[in-house]
Amino acid sequence: MTSTDQRVHVLPVHRTNRTVAIMGTRARSVAGRLRDAIRRKAVESALAVRNLVSRTSVLGRGISTVTLTTHGARVAGSALAIESIARGAVRPQRMILWIDDPATLNDLPAALRRLARRGLEIRLSDRNYGPHTKYYPYVRLPESSASPFVTADDDVVYPKYWLERLESAFLRQPDVVHCFRAHRIRFDGQAVAPYSSWIEPSGGQAEASDADPSLLNFATGVSGVIYPPLAGEALAAAGDAFVTSCSTADDVWIHVQLVRSGIPTHQIEATPRLFHLMQRAQADGLWTTTNGTANDVYIRAHYSGEVLARLLDVAGLASPRVEPESSVRGVADVSRRG
């Protein structure tokens, strides 16, 4: 081969710059994920140490009861979620962890036993209600109507301000459900649109804001929700029909009962919040069957009739009422007689 046959392929400058830019973006993304993973691990490790050494009560001057559940492989990790609440600026007056399996209750991890010595109540549910176990056994207690209650998830590390801000929102508006994260229900004609199309309140949309409680706001329980006693009474009165009709979609079932009772929901900040989610718990999640379009099965089943009519009315989409033909004639006849 002669030297004239040898060719050096040089990329155009604009393509080279683009490649470098893409590689830089990917490197920054990987570095960011690595920093985030290290930070999360550090937070979880600090909570684990706190659990080992702290003698401080998990209870405090708060006005609410925090209620949550755990199961299976998530039981051990639930201590970190509870510990994060216990380190809060405001601690609840009562905190209950519901267990649905007697064998688990009789063989609790050491971390949960330590929390129990500091005031955590660990109670056996009468049955496995799935994700509904975090609230349903509690609202059936006679004393539950005396104060607001807060639901939490067992795989989330909550910030120190978490309960303080929820309770402050409740004290300002005690007849409203308050949460850190909500969706805004949308419609397709006279029907509720698919779950994937729902938007975050105040997420760049004019029709909702953090100052606007509404029946159209749909609280998502992962970031924490505070309920007024009236909401607990409504959930207790609705019974456990969710076992057969809405078994894995507790957020849907709860919202439907709130709409029926006329209790609006309020996202307490302009920006919806998603807090530190512990990765190891996600593989054994309580809600894995309700992600994506699976929620739509429950939505179609429950957002109908009276519930749908009330939501359409709030959204200004209700069909105008048409008087029966006989009534119209009657009015006309009276007019002529006058």
Image (tube, rainbow, N blue to C red):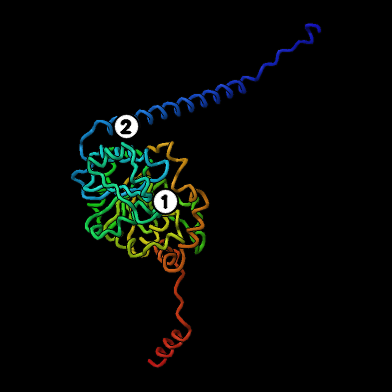
Q: Is residue 210 visible?
A: no
* Residues at marks 2 and 1, CA–CA distance in whole angstroms: 33 Å
The picture places residue 260, in percent across and down from the top left corner, at: 37, 65
Residue sticking out furthest to the left: 61
The picture places residue 17, in percent across and down from the top left corner, at: 58, 21
The picture places residue 42, in percent across and down from the top left corner, at: 35, 28
In the figure, residue 137 lies in which quadrant?
bottom left
The picture places residue 27, in percent across and down from the top left corner, at: 50, 24
User: In the rendered structure, which amino acid carries the disc numbered 2?
Assistant: Ala
- Position of the C terminus, as image quadrant, is bottom left
Estimate how packed mark 1 is, as few (under 14), some (14 to 19) or many (20 or more) residues with alpha carbons within 10 Å.
many
Query: Residue at (55%, 23%) from the top-left corner?
Result: 23
Left or right: 25 as drawn, with respect to 96: right
- What residue is disc 2 on? 48
- What residue is disc 1 on? 183
Q: Is residue 153 above or below residue 213?
A: above
Helix, strand or loop at disc 1?
A: strand
Query: Residue at (28%, 48%) from the top-left corner?
Result: 96
